[in-house]
Amino acid sequence: MIDIRSLEIKEICELSEALGEKAFRGKQISEWLCRGASSFGEMTNLPASFRAKLEESCRISGLEVLRRLKSKDGTQKFLYGLDDGNAIETVFMKYKYGNSICISSQAGCRMGCVFCASGKNGLSRDLTPGEMAGQIQVTQALCCGEGERISHVVVMGTGEPFDNYENVRKFVRLINQEKGLGIGHRNITISTCGIVPRIADMASDMPQVNLAISLHAPNDAIRRGIMPIANKYPVSELIDACRSYAEKTHRRVTFEYAVTKGVNDSDECIRELASLLRGMLCHVNLIPLNPIEEGALESPGRKRAEEIREMLESLGIPATVRRTLGSDIDASCGQLRLSQSSRDTI
Ligand code: SAH
């Protein structure tokens, strides 16, 4: 069965013709998908005979709302059930510049970062391009009013996007289509734990898409203790790849740094971080660590994160402390999905 969500508009048009219909029917199908349709039955402007044919050969990958949490600040978190019983998280956020969404790229994750809840049960499977685009289509239909849309996308939910590169690349093509969701490359950010060869691939395949690197440490000794991927790619290689990326694309690289008490938050660490990044077109996004289990890694608090920001700025590295949205529906980074796996009812 062909998953129609994973097809570009021109491919849906070709499919319509192959099924004996006019090509423009493909555009109608795409419009329905963008409006969050989950079945061919809803597509009432298609002839019934065509809908029946579609049902025989195609499917629309499902995203069933298992849980929906609404914050006072407008943030909404969704736990979507997929057709095979996997569950993934999606977060909708309202910013001054528009509506933004954080999508998942895999069900689970095999990167094993010690501070992150998403990888605690390992990788279940890659998401298809359609399941990634579907998170935007369905969430937009649920959260946006008439004439309102999701304009910004971050691939920062569960999963490692560079461990599912080809599907992420097709996903970017899907959501960029002008007659589809129409999300510009400059409004898309892909965040990676640092699978180095894919950084150069991204620079040539989608040079306008923003790159964010989960760095979290200024050297291999600290990074290897919290991120297994650092055993494969040393910090020096990662930073070299980022420097080449910035030179080639003229795009600013974002470095995410989860500030963790006693691990990476000393003045010495921050000075080392500043010299590592000096001279690169970049920006550091400090995230006070969100603890995932009792008694393990801790946050030194927002005040320390602010001090670190000032220190970095004084050393010539632009830095911000990430705004925390949706703190009253706290379920960050895979926590919703984890809690679901130990729960029977919703
Ligand atoms: N695999 C990708 C994208 C998903 S994680 C990546 O590693 O970038 C999105 C961001 O949240 C990453 O920067 C990740 O390191 C960070 N993160 C994960 N768990 C966290 C936690 N408990 N507290 C703060 N940030 C966390």
Image (cartoon, rainbow, N blue to C red):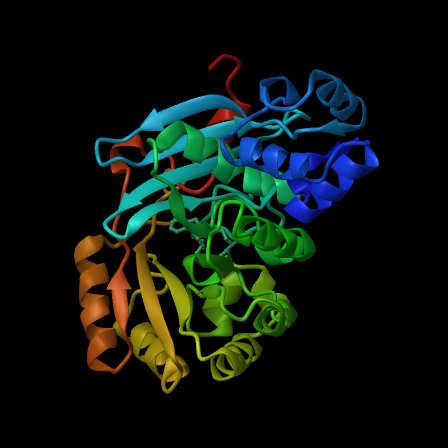
Residue occupying image coordinates x 61% and y 65% = 195
Return the residue nearer the eye: 322 or 231: 322
At which x and y percent is residue 149? 38, 41
At which x and y percent is residue 14? 76, 43
Up the image or down, 60 lies above or below 266; here it is above
Return the residue nearer the eye: 42 or 334: 42
Up the image or down, 179 lies above or below 335; here it is below
Up the image or down, 195 lies above or below 19; here it is below
Return the residue nearer the eye: 17 or 278: 17
Q: Is residue 49 left or right of residue 116?
A: right
* Outermost residue, bottom side: 279
Q: Is residue 264 left or right of residue 172?
A: left
At which x and y percent is residue 138? 49, 31
Which quarter of the picture shows residue 27?
top right
Residue occupying image coordinates x 57% and y 73% = 203
At which x and y percent is residue 287? 32, 56
Which quarter of the picture shows residue 140?
top left
The reply to whether residue 67 is in sight is yes
Up the image or down, 83 lies above or below 227; here it is above
Residue occupying image coordinates x 30% and y 36% = 75
Locate the N terminus by quadrant: top right
The reply to whether residue 296 is in sight is no
* Outermost residue, top side: 345
